[in-house]
Amino acid sequence: MFRRVCRAERVSFPALSVFSLTCLLLMPLALRAAEEQPLVAPRPEAQASESDPGVSAEDLAVRAKESVVSVSFAGRDGQEAGMGTGFVIDANGLIATNLHVIGEARPITVQLLDGTSYEVQEVYATDRQMDLAVLKIAVDNLKPLKLAEPDTLKQGAEVVVLGNPQGLRYSVVKGVNSGTREVDGKPMLQLAIPIEPGNSGGPVLDSQGRVQGIVTLKSAVTRNLGYAVNVSALKGLLEKPNPVPIDRWLTIGTLDEHLWKPLFGSRWRQRAGRIQVDGFGSGLGSRSLCVSQEVLPELPYEVAVEVKLDDESGAAGLIFYSDENTKHYGFYPSNKSLRISRFDGPDVFLWRVLDEKKSNAYREEEWNHLKVRLEKDRILCFVNDEKVFEVKDQRYTEGKVGLAKFRNTVASFRGFQVASEIPPYRPSKETAQKILDLTEDLRVDRPPQADLIEAVVKQTDERRAQQALQERARLLQKQAERLKQLAQSIHERAVRDELKAIFASDKKEADIDLMEAALLIARLDNNEVDPKVYLGQMKSMANEINKTLPEDANAKAKLKALNQYLFHETGFHGSRTNYYSRSNSYINETIEDREGLPITLSVLYMELGRRLGLDIDGVGLPGHFVVRVNSISEKGELVDVFEGGEPLSDEAAKVMILTANGGRFDAEFLKSQPKREIIQRMLRNLLNLARDDEDVQAMLRYVETMIAIDEELLQERWLRAVLRYQTGRIAEAIADTDYLLEKSPEGFDLRRIHEFRNYLDTMQQD
């Protein structure tokens, strides 16, 4: 994975975080380094070539520093919005850098070592594919860096990168050329070197001070790994420049002022027939508008646009009856729902949501067609031809139409229309059915044939044919996902049935195989786990220990042999580096990796001890799990398995209870836990980890299993009702709330449960 470095936003529960490769190796200008001298960073652990004589990194930095510049561009407010690196390639003011460093349609400034700044006069050359740009500033007598000849940098050769990482001006870092690698279809130099925000556009120098590449990417998974465009790409660009004067550069992507009027900040631009917007607006709710200057027809008329959000938690769509200021109506998707609002001024007290609802016609993470029909006495709102709202609000009845976006939404718009009547967006049901009939026997072993393509196109225009087929494809994809979900549910059901059998009410505590139950928890998340294999491994481990014991070995000898085997011979230990990894909660991985949590190590200890004839119970201290060995004394001895089988005094255990329990001692914590409670505790650990990961499906999986083992877990049943609702299982959520209302348990807010039950009824009707 590779990135050009920007920040990822953490999404709050219940939405799931979605992580993608980021782009933009430039520095948001929050910091400035006071030191202007080159800083030599530690060299990464990589083997340099001993055959490459040359100048030291320190000497290279001194020689090249006058040729290295900082490149920054201004935001809409005129303030510096980002910074990268560039370097002089011609004495008469040519500067090489990355294209992404200079932004699009923004004023660009180049600052030299002595602090003097120059506005860029011309974007002399650009190559979007190779992410290269050459800038022209009005200055001469600069000191250029020499460009190396192609293919003169050997694999393993030392390199030096100069730049402005993290706002530190003119720093230098040493590394090694690891070779050439193709990235996104482009040959790149792979560098064993730490790359940071601000290095982008910096020169990669060989030991002779020649430019071998231009830094452009860093690895998203490996810290000391970066990528650079080969200098040959820069040389090719200089042979065929495509100069654009800065006054023309600043208009690239800008909207025609005769057609559109942006308001309240954000960045509105046009590209490939689409209008795109990003950045915070300065209006209420970070609102930003783009008002159409088109002459409107008489009522009734319709306005429509297709919109796509980069994040469904955002909001963007249509406005109408606008005074070209703070008063207007809006129809837009917002946080996966559709909303119609009236804006009566600049603050939150003058913003009224007229209606809001979810719609099955709305397609998340795809293009959606929004349409508003304005009549004398009502407003009709549609998404993908399905009517969503009919509103008779008459506060405003005239004004402009246009586009809006809220919060930090990045949105794209296309196909903006205003007309007395706009044709349907989707094909008619009859046409769609004809197209589906034609594709009913579509073969999966070969691409569509020309005669089929011709037959489909004859039914309607290209766009509507695509829509019909894409809609069918979406349905099939959803069905495929549901089939996978069904298969997973059957697997989970089978595991729960096995656990219920282990903890059947007629089962004696001594007959419960705790290890088998713990393995089933691991199998719940990984159907490749075969409990029989690990139970056989447990038997082998017990046999190994027994071989070291005399036939008449007493309990103390067995305990000593158990400790010797686990902690000294096989190296089982408590996990500290990755304590909160889910792997530590799976007993099979504890056996394989020989590390785990206090509870998984304790279960292993208890079950191996049982196979040796030892009587060992689990003791669930708050925040820590230990065991009690009953075989060696009448009272039993506490042992901390996580700490290598160290004995734990009663006094030390009491201190642990007091510390973890807010200074209150409760002797119940020192009692042995039934095996059912131990398994519930393991599931609760996994539940907490899933909650931290915002993994709603996993949370539901663990709660379902806990209740399968013990139907009287009322708090968990309430949580299950909420999780079932969040995952679209409305009928099942209703069953849980009805159960709780029937039981009316003490300590529960029954009013809240009633409200939730009524809400579920509404959702089910919708």
Image: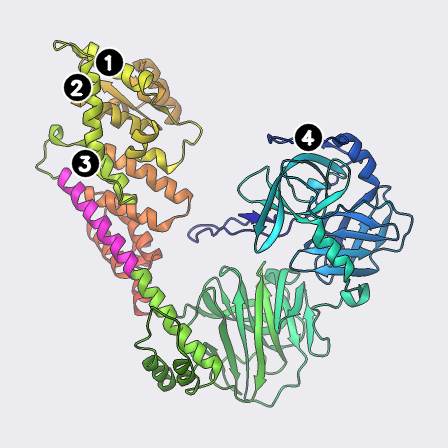
- Comparing 658 with 505, the one in front is 505
574 magenta-colored: no
Name the element at disc 2: loop
The Cα atoms of the two marked residues, 1 and 2, are separated by 10 Å
Q: Which circle's residue, 1 or 3, is located before the other in the chain?
A: 3
Q: In the displayed structure, would residue 345 be above or below residue 196?
A: below
Residues shaded magenta: 483-503
The Cα atoms of the two marked residues, 3 and 4, are separated by 57 Å
For residue 231, which numbered disc appears in the image?
A: none
Circle 3: residue type: Lys
The Cα atoms of the two marked residues, 2 and 4, are separated by 62 Å
Circle 4: residue type: Ser
Q: Is residue 175 left or right of 537 when viewed as pictured?
A: right
Residue linked to disc 4: 51
In the rendered structure, are the residues bearing label 2 and label 4 in contact, judged by CB atoms less than 8 Å apart? Answer: no
Residue linked to disc 3: 532
Q: In the displayed structure, would residue 546 be above or below residue 81?
A: above
Q: Is residue 698 left or right of 265 when viewed as pictured?
A: left
Q: Which circle, 3 or 4, is nearer the viewer?
A: 4
For residue 612, which numbered disc appears in the image?
A: 2
Q: Residue 687, located in which quarter of the rendered image?
A: top left
For residue 561, which numbered disc appears in the image?
A: 1
Badge 1: few (under 14), some or many (20 or more) residues near its Cα, within 10 Å? some
